[in-house]
Amino acid sequence: MSDSHVRVDAHGYEYAHQFDSAEHQHSASQLGMWVFIAQEILFFGGLFLTYTVYRYAYPAAFAQSSHHLDVTLGCFNTAVLIGSSLTMALAVHGAQLGRRWTQVIFLVLTIVLGSVFLGVKAIEYGHKFHEHLVPGPNFVFDGDAAHAQIFFSLYFVMTGLHALHMVIGIAILAVLVWQAWRGAYTPGYYSPVELTGLYWHFVDIVWIFLFPLLYLIGRHH
Amino acid sequence: MAAASHSTAARASAHAAHGAGHVVSLKVYFAIFAALMVLTAVTVGVAYVDLGVMNTFVALAVAVTKATLVILFFMHVKYSTKLTWLVVASGFFFLAIMIAFTLADFVSRGWLGTPGS
């Protein structure tokens, strides 16, 4: 980054020439990431809306289907994902203070927790295949099977899309570990760590809504 | 604090000496983590109590509270510029429009009956 387009502010932090300061550059990249996340809110929002409309139409079939999901595993995964949000926040904190090892360790922990979540999800998907709860010709359900298939279609699409976001997140985190290891991030420039954090926390928020809406409906019956 | 004169970065510049962004204390991060875990336990516990239609609303209220904590503290929006606040709010505003207008249609179907039947 040693070209004429880079300036240095009063704190010795480098920033691109179109910005007023390193903080201005940082807040501009945060804003850009939030524009992307606003789009993601509506992207997942479409699925949550579809879920709402069908649950409103077939409440009994949805409650009955929800009982086939494993609350213990869902609860465990919720805790794992919230834990991964904490380690992600601590990695950003490490980057802000210029602590290279703190960053690397917490980024790796975030990858580990994310992988545990995906592993548990894979086990849950396996159970659903064995129990013939995957929508299609082999779907077997004791009750309102036609509308239970709508629930399980939504379950696989929503959790599948969520899992895909996590796989992408883990791939980005792997690149960050490598960059942080090389000492690429300083208190004046750590936007990639911060922005990946925003993405990771957003994926956590999606799960915060998926967990009660998919796993916990009609449990008191 | 020369950087504080830049209006767009003014909100984030209070702690400029620490770097390009606001540094949140570790105490805050651990407190938010604890709150999120407690609220997860609450949402599971409440699901097994029969509150009628209120079960869904309680579950959503807890989820919204958890999401708000994540957005404000883990995602640093509490310490971000007003422009960032605007973008965050607009994302949820359009989500609300999409949900409210669609449900206004689905929920009200059948209220007036079908002409001729």
Image: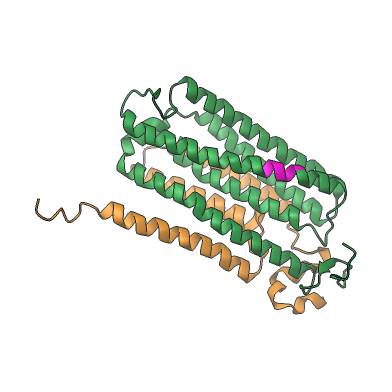
Q: Residue at x 75, y 67 (%)?
A: A25
User: Which residue is farthest top?
Assistant: A130
- Is residue B92 found left or right of B76 in the rendered image? left
Q: Which chain is orange?
A: B
Against B107, residue A219 (above or below) is above
Dominant secondary structure (helix, strand or loop) of the stretch shown in magenta: helix
**Residue A137 is covered by the magenta coloring:** no
Position of residue B85 in the picture relative to residue B64 (left or right): right
Residue B13, image x, y percentages: 75, 70
Q: Mark yes or no: residue B43 visible.
A: no
Where residue A44 appears, as percent x and y from the top left, is 50, 49
Residue B57 coordinates in the image, percent (x, y): 41, 48
- Nearer-the-camera pick, A17 or B93: A17
In front of the other: A162 or B53? A162
Q: Residue at x 87, y 51 (%)?
A: A183
Answer yes or no: is residue B17 visible: yes
Q: Which residues are magenta?
A: A169-174
The quadrant where residue A195 appears: bottom right
Report the side of B67 relative to A29 (left or right). left
Name the residue at 12% across, 56% down.
B115
Colour green belongs to chain: A
Residue B96 drawn above or below residue A172: below
Residue A81 lies, in percent from the top left, at: 62, 40
